[in-house]
Image (cartoon, rainbow, N blue to C red):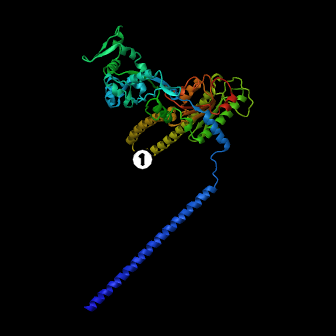
Amino acid sequence: MRSIHKRDHNEMTQQSETNLDINTKIIDDNNNINKSENNKKESNKQKKVNTSKNNKNKVETPKFTEEENEFLKRIKTQVKPVLDDFEEYGLVLDNIYVIDILAQTANKHIKTLSHIINDDFTSEFNHLKKIKKKPSPPPPSTTIVDGDKEKDKHKEEEEEEVEKDNKVSKNSTKQSSQTGNLLQLLICGESRFKNLKIILENVEYDKELGEIKFIGNDDDSEYQSLSNEQKGIIKFIKSNDFIVSIEKVPKYPPLLYEIWEDWNYNIWPCVFRAHIFSTPLISNVKDETLLEMRKYMSLAIEQAEIGKKRGHKGIGAVLIDPNTNKIVATSYDQTNRISVDETPEISETQYISPIISHCIMTITNKLSTEQVDDIKKQMKEQKKFEKEKQFENRNENENKNENKNENEICNDNDEEKEKEEKEEKEEKEECNILSFVNLGQYLATNFHLFITKEPCIMCSMALVHSRVKRVVYGSSSRDGGLGSYLKIHTEKSLNHRFEVYKDFMEDECKKLFDSPEAS
């Protein structure tokens, strides 16, 4: 028994020793792992410190040169997008009728009013919210006489006015004096119901009958001629003993968030809806794009100088494909019948009559002529390819017919004739010039035009028909069609609209042709 106990004891001690060894190994391994992790962290920290030092030592290269930065600074203050009329309105105030209501009754009155008034009746103020918290009245003014504070003479009058403004109904005079609990509810625009206050003075509400009675001395024909919405408004106001007042609110919706913040908190609560401008604001145009625009306008100025040397007006234009930055066409004004040729090395082609050879008319005619020539060339190639294909098919058919009898040949010939007739019809359709136009580039679709002078109305309409995407011009004209006299590019009745920027490199363009006439 003792030997057995000794053996067990020895086994126990051996097992405990092995366990201790394993535990010490695990602890050592963990320590090694922790040390390696700490070393990694320290090395990463050191790397970060080194990289930050290197970054500090590195001199950041400027994105643009000084001259380019000066140009960008100048151009951003000069260039303006030619927007639709409603997009250029600032703060224009209009009058609306409002009533004072208690906050706890707001939902009830809004629902009642929505049943009375049609949506069209207040459509011009869809950008406004229905209610606004009534501002608390200003504290009464006081004057100091001989160092003692005394009440102003007009204090009583001001208090009476405040009480009148705060009064919502005859039955709730105490509640209405608490202006913090009052809201202003929009009824309608003053222009929709100009004689509202006059009619309210000449009518009263019969609670027993639930009807409006005319009590004025004059004829009630004016009241009878009112629309259902107007009669409903009068009944709503009189049945609740509301006092109507007039507030000034923004007539047009805020198109920018900064404007919305100002109007929303300082005038009347407004609804902000993100607006996509007909021409992007200059603040949204990238600096790189503005520098590219300078390059193209400089080319237009070069064209204007060529035209000026030849005795024409100093107006030039360049047409660009923005997707490839390729110059599609260039032109200058050719309205002078007798050209003074000081540049014989440059050939001049008169596309149309000198009377209408404005810069835009010249470049659009030049573009259309080139496109028609390209289409004709494509049509010839297409016809040639089709003829070669037909010739190959005929040779194949002849080889097949040699191995067939007469009946089979006759049947095959009939089928071939039908096929040929179908192919001829298809060829005629394919060779139609309109099919090539639809497949390819149509005039100035998606192109950008740079011109030194604002186009006239005739040229502006030509740009509409050419489907141009953007026009950038230098100096304005008295009778211009893109901002000065008309805004043809924003006309909603036309089937195409495009972007327009004005006053781009205005000083440089004015030197070439400083005249109020359009190009």
Q: Residues within 10 Å of mark 1 (few under 14, many from 20)?
A: few
Q: Where residue 117 appears, x then y in whole percent?
A: 34, 23
Q: Where residue 147 appears, x then y in whole percent?
A: 53, 28
Residue 104 visible in the shown view? yes
Q: In the image, 182: left or right of 40?
A: left
Which quarter of the image is occupied by the N terminus?
bottom left
Residue positioned 42% across, 26% down in the render: 125
Classify 399 as above or below 338: below
Q: Amino acid at mark 1?
A: Asn
* Residue in the foreground of this view, choosing between 51 and 462: 51
**Residue farthest right in this picture:** 342
- Residue 6 is drawn in which quadrant? bottom left
* Residue in the foreground of this view, choosing between 311 and 156: 156
Q: Secondary structure at mark 1?
A: loop
* Residue in the foreground of this view, choosing between 449 and 500: 500
Q: Where residue 201 appears, x then y in whole percent?
A: 36, 14
Q: Which residue is mark 1?
A: 403
Classify 29 as above or below 433: below
Classify 481 as above or below 386: above
Which quarter of the image is occupied by the C terminus?
top right
Residue 492 visible in the shown view? no
Q: Where residue 265 appears, x then y in whole percent?
A: 46, 33
Q: How many marks?
A: 1
* Residue in the foreground of this view, choosing between 276 and 218: 218
- Residue 206 is drawn in which quadrant? top left
Q: In the image, 419: left or right of 507?
A: left
Classify 446 as above or below 95: below
Residue positioned 53% across, 65% down in the render: 42
- Residue 308 is drawn in which quadrant? top right
